[in-house]
């Protein structure tokens, strides 16, 4: 498959030369296929128990501030409510839509038994839509859910205003709870450093606090 995205040029410290990488954009079919494969590999060991589908009344079409508001408002609050209700819940979600149907969210859940009535009431209060389905998750669910994000319609740039581009940029198509994250496989210098930084961040808590300067040692 041919990449239609831009290529990013970076300096490789190991080989002392410049290398170019695909941009890794959801808008490029080849890149999005790679991203889906990466998610499937990352969640290979994780057995999600349920898949919950949330329907909305927002179409995937410009102006995109509706979509941005949906993602940063009702969807964020729904996930927050689920986290409050189920302490150790782990999840992975993706947004999906076709040109004919409205945006929907697929949510894969682990370590929690969702109550359909409660979720429906909450979702109706947040978005006005009460259509929520629950089904048991299968081994292929991660691929299915991530593919939904990859198959969102690609709208030509000519039809998008600068504000739309910005809204799309800040609206993530997939997400996961922090406690479910398995480390990403390093590929390429840039991402390897990114994972190193994440590991460094996780070690910050283990550094003992400095002795206070006020105490006088004999
Ligand atoms: Zn690409």
Image (cartoon, rainbow, N blue to C red):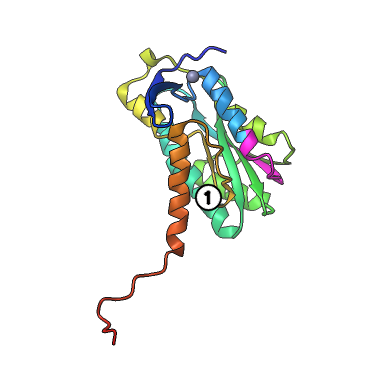
Q: Position of residue 157 (x, y in %)?
A: 38, 16
Q: Position of residue 105 (x, y in %)?
A: 57, 36
Q: What is the residue that sits farthest to the front in this orientation?
A: 15
Res. 161 image quadrant: top left
Q: Nearer the viewer, residue 121 or 147?
A: 147
Residue at disc 1, CB closer than 8 Å to ligand 1:
no
Q: Position of residue 48 (x, y in %)?
A: 69, 45
- Would you place residue 16 above or below residue 181 in this image? above
Element type at mark 1: helix
Q: Nearer the viewer, residue 14 or 213?
A: 14
User: Is residue 152 visible to the viewer in this orientation of the structure?
Assistant: no
Chain part drawn in magenta: 40-55
Q: Is residue 82 left or right of residue 156?
A: right
Q: What is the residue that sits farthest to the bottom in this orientation?
A: 218
Residue drawn where x is 53% and y is 54% of the image: 81
- Would you place residue 191 above or below residue 210 in this image? above
Where does the C terminus fall, quadrant-wise? bottom left
Query: Which residue matches tag 1?
Result: 178
Res. 46 image quadrant: top right
Residue drawn where x is 72% and y is 33% of the image: 140
Q: Nearer the viewer, residue 51 or 92?
A: 92
Residue drawn where x is 43% and y is 46% of the image: 197
């Amino acid at each position: 498959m041919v990449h239609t995205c831009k290529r990013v040029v970076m300096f490789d410290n190991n080989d002392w030369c410049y290398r170019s990488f695909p941009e890794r954009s959801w808008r490029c079919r080849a890149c999005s296929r790679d991203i889906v494969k990466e998610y499937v590999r990352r969640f290979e060991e994780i057995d999600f128990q349920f898949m919950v589908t949330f329907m909305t009344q927002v179409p995937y079409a410009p102006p995109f501030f509706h979509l941005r508001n949906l993602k940063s408002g009702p969807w964020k609050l729904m996930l927050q409510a689920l986290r409050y209700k189920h302490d150790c819940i782990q999840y992975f979600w993706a947004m999906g839509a076709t040109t004919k149907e409205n945006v929907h969210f697929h949510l894969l859940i682990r370590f929690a038994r969702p109550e359909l009535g409660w979720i429906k009431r909450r979702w109706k209060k947040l978005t006005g839509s009460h259509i929520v389905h629950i089904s048991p998750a299968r081994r292929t669910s991660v691929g299915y859910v991530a593919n939904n994000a990859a198959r969102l319609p690609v709208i030509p740039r000519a039809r998008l205003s600068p504000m739309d581009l910005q809204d799309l940029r800040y609206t993530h198509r997939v997400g996961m709870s922090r406690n479910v994250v398995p480390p990403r496989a390093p590929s390429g210098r840039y991402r390897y450093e990114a994972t190193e930084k994440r590991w460094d961040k996780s070690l910050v808590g283990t550094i003992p606090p400095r002795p206070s300067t006020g105490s006088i040692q004999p």
